[in-house]
Image: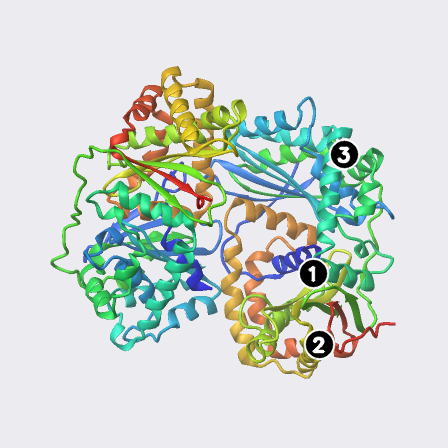
Amino acid sequence: MFHAKRLIAATFIWAASAVASSAIEPQEFMLDNGMQVVVIEDHRAPVVVHMVWYKVGAADDPAGHSGIAHFLEHLMFKATDTLEEGQFDATVQANGGTHNAFTSWDYTAYHQRVAADRLSLMMEMEADRMVNLRLDRSDWLPERDVILRERGQTLESSPDRVFSEQMRAALYQNSPYGRPIIGWRHEMEQLTGDIATAFYRVHYAPNNAILVVAGDVDPQEVLALAQQYYGPIPAVQDMPERFRPQEPPQLAERRLTMHDARVGQPYMNRLYITPQRHSGDQREAAAFTMLAALLSGGSATSVLDRALTYDANIAISSWASYNGSALDSGVFSLGIMPVEGVSLQEAEDALDTTVAQFIEDGIDMEQLERVRMQVRAEAIYQLDDTAQRANSIGADLALGLTLQDNEDWLHVLEDVTPEEILTAARHLDRRESVTGWLMGVEE
Amino acid sequence: MRILAAFTLALGLSAPFTAGAIDIQDVTSPGGHSAWLVEEHSIPFVSLDVVFTGGAALDPEGRAGAVQLMTSLLTEGAGDLDAQGYASALESLAGSITFEAGRDSVSMNIRALTENRDEVIELAMMALTEAQFGQMSIDRVRGQTVAYLERAALDPNTVAQQTYLQLGYAGHAYATPTEGTPDTVAALTVDDILNAHAAAFTSDRMYVGASGDITAAELGAIVDRITRDLPVSEAPLPEYHRFDAPAGVTVVDFPGPQSVIQFGHGGIAADDDDFMAAYAMNEIFGGSGFGSRLMGELREARGLTYGIYTSLASSKFGDSYAGRFSTGNENAAEAIELVRAQFQWLADGGITQDDLSRIQTYLTGAYPLRFDGNDSIAGILAAMQFQGYPLNYVNIRNDLLRAVTLEDVQRMAQRLAQPDALQFVVVGQPVGVVTTTQ
């Protein structure tokens, strides 16, 4: 059961964007060994979320070893010098807690949610496995079968996911973002405990980690506990620079066609490389976020829904989305699933026409106000979920953003002008995109 | 679904808490109404949960489903807004208003930003007191409900629980489903809906829980605003009825390879002085959280089922100690005898100190995780008043649980577990099992 949860989380990119309001300001500390500590107080209930984020993810997998960051995430539940295999899991459960772990392209995170009086127990175990993992006395081989099965069950069994993997691989010409988080099957099959241990020794260290503790805690007490458990772990002296291969100028639009007998409804999807959030400068990313919300905000009044479903009966559904929370680049996507009798080419043309018309007409200010209201409300409601707030902050920090950036995000979103949103829309460049059609098998 | 809802409620209210820090205020409004509040200004919104005692238990004879149908019509047109107008008004305020009908209560859940709280409250009041109940909406929602109930009748779990309740609550409101039956719902009229509305939402049977960015004075004003347009109750509440199905087996023929088996007997009232001991006992025996005795014996040791759970279904107007599982038709007879033997084990003092310590660690740790945001907290506050728990309960709950001794649990097991009184409802085509219930 526990594995099943991690399987899903591992392939999930956190759309991190919650925002602080007048909530108690998170406190930030730095341990002597370089470990960053953030404490978010929420005293409404005696519960605590304890997370450790490592600034390493699938985009840091060495060439030929795709999937190693994710494999290691699984192996982190194996034996340490003092804990037996499975004991971490059992201890959290016996204490009524829940726990999870996930890997993205840019970070790997481990978290537990427990009664506040059990925080030190979690810290003790998490600090232990930061450096004491013992794959040489663990049975790592069955876990490789687990991740291969995971790839089979969650990815290869779904034409949508396979298509999405192919799309990403085609979008990136040089960046490791084109590789799947879980890894390519033929490379996963070659991963070993030794390869995982080597990766672990390089990247798992206090000076490459962020501790986030959120809930019914006193920041000074958390700091004292962190010093007690994480403080003695020595920093790794030669932590590698976080350098990834960057994209060259992209000059040619790519198009993919995929047929699969399991496809019920054909659809078209397009991914564009776009700017990401930058520390101290999130306006561009905010403009893309607002653009996606105006085009496809989930309400019947959004631009694509209105034009393609209500005014003209072309689309079963249509979508626009943007994720700008990434180290090297953001992705904007546009897509449409046509109704019976409308071809993918006709649907794609209608989608492109609608976006072009949107740019020509300019922004409907009433709609923008409604979207601003929804954005503001959602950001407030998200704060209610302390675990989600800890997630948002942890993910941002792991991307090299700051607490200030995390807090500013809402205000930047609200502040973005109609002109900036239109500029973002005009920025979407087909030469930096991949367009895919997913279809059933031709008769 | 109904039984599960009752299970959830019983669990939700009986789970314990660590000595710690939920600061609950008992607010009295200028008009003299009470509300419980967790005041927390850090996030600019509030969640309100308003529970009205009665619910589907108020449906008159032959009108089962009236309260449920009425509740689902409240936001289908109210005041001068049609259903779409209502939805978009709510969307532009970024608030949330939902109504739910249960076996013992109806509830109104509101989530509103501080900046437009009054407007959201007014919109909620419009639904609560000015719903249109237009004939077209009634016809449409009634049709959907009947279609849903016809599908539900094909679910062996639904059949099992309905049969179980009919056997143990004969002549009581709990014997009929909250949603009604296809026949009773199809026959409901506008008058039935209006009567259900007048009976279900009354100012003297109302409990309010609030959590978030609101002061006691502001909450008091809202409570008075809610009660202002509500009537005082006239419909009597049902009498308390202890589940009293005869012992035995009741087979309901149902095609398929599996039998769904619901079993149980009378339970314990939620306000019993020894309820906590019963709670710990049940969690060890058949609780859902952490390796129970029944799971060990039926699933792990013998592979007879995927899951088996028991629960103290201690509701407002009746109580039963019930459980459910499914098994292959050919294993039904063996499984029934095993369950009976486990009840005997329980009554004979099978639980050990180690079982109790383990469950105390688990439950005291799991309890606070329920308080995960304003919505949950408001809901718990309203439900605690509805059930009659004291204000400080959440903060002493874990201590009470830790204070339960093995002796307490054994005494309770002896009192509660009655292997010879068990009723087994078997929905399926079990091999070698026949109806013995008189």
Secondary structure type for disc 1: helix
The one of B414 and A60 positioned closer to us in this rendering: A60
Q: Give neighbour class at mark 3: few <14, some 14-19, many 20+ (Cα, 10 Å).
A: some
Q: Which residue is mark 3?
A: B139
- Indicate the amino acid at tag 3: Asp
Q: Which residue is mark 1?
A: B157
Q: Please say if A12 is above or below B44.
A: below
Q: Give neighbour class at mark 1: few <14, some 14-19, many 20+ (Cα, 10 Å).
A: many
CB-based contact (under 8 Å), mark 1 and mark 3: no
Q: Report the residue at 38% width, 26% height from top.
A: A352
The part of the image, by quadrant, that contains residue B228 is top right
In the rendered structure, the answer to whether residue A424 lies left or right of residue B316 reads left
The one of A93 and B394 positioned closer to us in this rendering: A93
Q: Which residue is mark 2?
A: B336
Secondary structure type for disc 3: helix
- Indicate the amino acid at tag 1: Asn
Separation of marks 3 and 2 at Cα, in angstroms = 44 Å
Separation of marks 1 and 2 at Cα, in angstroms = 17 Å
Residue at mark 1 shares a chain with residue at mark 3: yes
- What label sits on residue A297 in the rendered view? none
Name the outermost residue toward the top.
A361
Name the outermost residue toward the left.
A238
**Sequence-wise, which precedes: disc 1 or disc 2?**
1
**Sequence-wise, which precedes: disc 1 or disc 3?**
3
Subunit that carries the residue with mark 1 = B
Q: Is residue B18 visible?
A: no
Quarter containing the N terminus of chain B: bottom right
The part of the image, by quadrant, that contains residue A258 is top left
Subunit that carries the residue with mark 3 = B
Secondary structure type for disc 2: helix
Name the outermost residue toward the front.
A443
Q: Report the residue at 82% width, 39% height from top.
A: B188
